[in-house]
Each structure stands twice: as structure tokens, then as C-alpha cells.
């Protein structure tokens, strides 16, 4: 899916299932929508909602404030990914990429010039989460 995932991770997974059913995505993607336990989806939603809330609370944030917010959401997602309560299920490659894209787009939605921020820090666009990401 090239578009931004919806605010709710469960909604995004439901959309994957609908896209498979409609023939937009191939049948190999069907398992992605079915393989995540509700506990992982809820925990992911919670981490992303906290990040969005933190970003809403920042007014003209400094680079350091932005990176602290990114660090917090990535560390929260690391904890979600390795939480044994999800039965050993964690994020797969496509979901990892979507989560990184989500962080990038959410920053832009909250007024952060992500390209300029990354240029100032010498980080490539896809690497905004790399300093903290385990998933």
C-alpha cells in the first residue's frame, strides 16, 4: 500500500483484507491481515496515538524535540514487536516500512519539514527511525 496507513492500525489491516478481496492486492497479502493478534494491533495503535498526541502538543519544535518524539515512538514500537503477549508475532517487512513511513508522514502532518530536518542531521529519508529501531 503506497498510501499512508489510517490512524488506527487495525483499520489499516482491515483495509489490507478488503484490498485482497477486491483484487487490488495479491492473495499472498491475505495472511498479513489475519496474522496479527488483536493485542499487537491495539498496542501498535496505542504507541502511534501517543506519538500523534505528542506531536500535536509541540509548537514549532526544535530538531531535538522532534527526534525525542521519534525516539519514544520507536522504542514503544520495539517493545510492542518483542512483547511475548502477542504469541511471538511481530512486525513483518512491509509493516516495518509502513511504520517508518507513518512516522515520516505524521511529522509532516504536524508541520515538520522532514527533508530539511534530515538534511541538517545528515540522515537519509528512510533512516529517520534507524538510530533506535529493532524491528
Image (cartoon, rainbow, N blue to C red):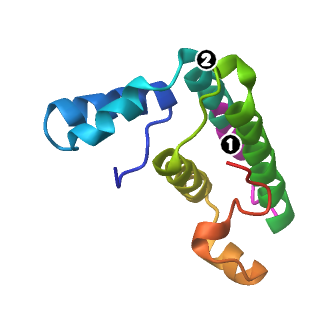
View extreme (left): residue: 23
Label 1 Cα crowd, 10 Å radius (few <14 / some 14-19 / many 20+) = some
Residue at 44%, 42% in the rendered image: 5
In magenta, the rendered stretch is 49-62
Q: Circle 1 — which element? A: helix
On the image, the x and y values in percent for residue 71 come to 80, 52
Residue 7, visible in the rendered structure: yes
| Other residues around mark 2 within 10 Å, as few (<14) / some (14–19) / many (≥20) | some
**Toward which corner of the image does residue 124 lie, by quadrant?**
bottom right
- Give the labeled residue for mark 2: 39
Residue 41 percent across, percent down from the top left:
55, 25
Q: Is residue 84 magenta?
A: no
N-terminal of the two: label 2 or label 1?
Answer: 2
Do we see residue 58 in this rendering?
no
The reply to whether the magenta stretch includes residue 58 is yes
Residue identified by numbered label 1: 56
Q: Do the residues labelled 2 and 1 touch (CB within 8 Å)?
A: no
Quarter location, residue 46: top right
Considering the whole magenta stretch, tell me its main secondary structure.
helix
Instruction: Residue at 17%, 44% (x, y): give it.
Output: 24
Q: Which of marks 2 and 1 is in front?
A: 2
User: Horizontally, is 104 left or right of 55 in the view?
Assistant: left
Q: Which of 10 and 21 is in front in this view?
A: 21
Q: Nearer the viewer, residue 85 or 42?
A: 85
What residue sits 24% from the left and 29% below the top?
18
Left or right of 118 on screen, residue 69 = right
Amino acid at each position: 500500500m503506497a498510501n499512508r496507513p489510517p490512524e488506527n492500525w487495525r483499520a489499516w489491516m482491515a483495509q489490507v483484507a478488503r484490498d485482497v478481496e477486491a483484487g487490488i492486492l495479491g492473495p499472498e497479502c491475505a495472511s498479513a491481515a489475519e496474522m496479527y493478534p488483536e493485542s499487537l494491533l491495539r498496542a501498535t495503535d496505542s504507541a502511534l496515538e501517543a506519538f500523534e498526541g505528542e506531536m500535536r502538543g509541540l509548537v514549532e519544535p526544535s530538531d531535538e524535540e522532534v527526534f525525542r518524539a521519534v525516539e519514544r515512538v520507536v522504542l514503544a514500537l520495539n517493545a510492542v514487536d518483542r512483547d511475548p503477549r502477542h504469541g511471538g508475532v511481530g512486525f513483518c517487512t512491509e509493516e516495518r516500512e509502513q511504520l517508518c513511513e507513518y512516522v515520516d508522514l505524521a511529522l509532516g502532518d504536524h508541520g515538520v519539514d522532514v527533508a530539511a530536518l534530515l538534511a541538517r542531521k545528515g540522515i537519509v529519508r528512510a533512516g529517520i527511525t534507524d538510530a533506535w529501531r529493532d524491528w
